[in-house]
Amino acid sequence: MRTRISIFCDYILEAGWLLAIIVTPLFFNVYSSRVFEPDKLTLLRSIALLMAVSWLVRLIEERALGDVRRGNRQPPSPQTAF
């Protein structure tokens, strides 16, 4: 069973690569003589960072959910008073 968080992260990942493919080439400065301007690079890096964070959240959430399903979650260790 997938949770809302993993589904939302999948939507972000899907939209991210589509956005990177479509928007990055369209984002250009007419006054620049360079092909790949720093503005494009910043936009592409921001999209990639958002996708990486979304992927990490999904990975952590699915691993935690998998541990709960299998019963591998460790009980909390008793704290000893010294």
Image (cartoon, rainbow, N blue to C red):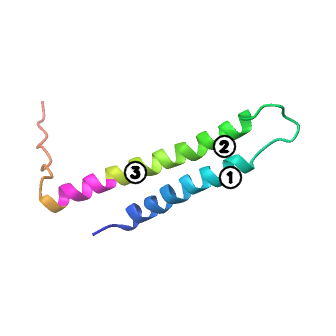
Helix, strand or loop at disc 3? helix
* Quarter the N terminus occupies: bottom left
For marks 2 and 3, give the one nearer the viewer.
Answer: 2
The quadrant holding residue 79 is: top left
- Whole-percent x, y for residue 3 in the image: 34, 67
Q: Residue at position x 46%, y 46% from top?
A: 53
Is disc 2 surrounded by few (<14), some (14 to 19) or many (20+) residues within 10 Å?
some
Q: Amino acid at mark 1?
A: Val
Which comes sooner in the sequence, label 1 or label 3? 1
- Whole-percent x, y for residue 60 in the image: 32, 50
- Whole-percent x, y for residue 5 in the image: 40, 62
Q: Nearer the viewer, residue 38 or 76?
A: 38
Residue receiving disc 1? 23
Circles 1 and 3: CB distance less than 8 Å?
Answer: no
Q: Nearer the viewer, residue 4 or 42?
A: 42
Circles 2 and 1: CB distance less than 8 Å?
Answer: yes
Q: Nearer the viewer, residue 38 or 33?
A: 33
Q: Note whether 33 is above or below 56 in the view shown.
A: above
Q: Amino acid at mark 3?
A: Val
The quadrant holding residue 32 is: top right
Helix, strand or loop at disc 1? helix
Residue receiving disc 2? 43
Q: What's the CA distance linking mark 2 and mark 3? A: 21 Å
Is disc 1 surrounded by few (<14), some (14 to 19) or many (20+) residues within 10 Å?
some
Q: Residue at position x 15%, y 47% from top?
A: 76
Residue 78 relative to residue 31: left or right: left
Q: What's the CA distance linking mark 2 and mark 1? A: 9 Å
Helix, strand or loop at disc 2? helix
Residue 52 relative to residue 34: left or right: left
Residue receiving disc 3? 57
Q: Amino acid at mark 2?
A: Leu
Magenta segment boundaries in residue numbering: 61-68
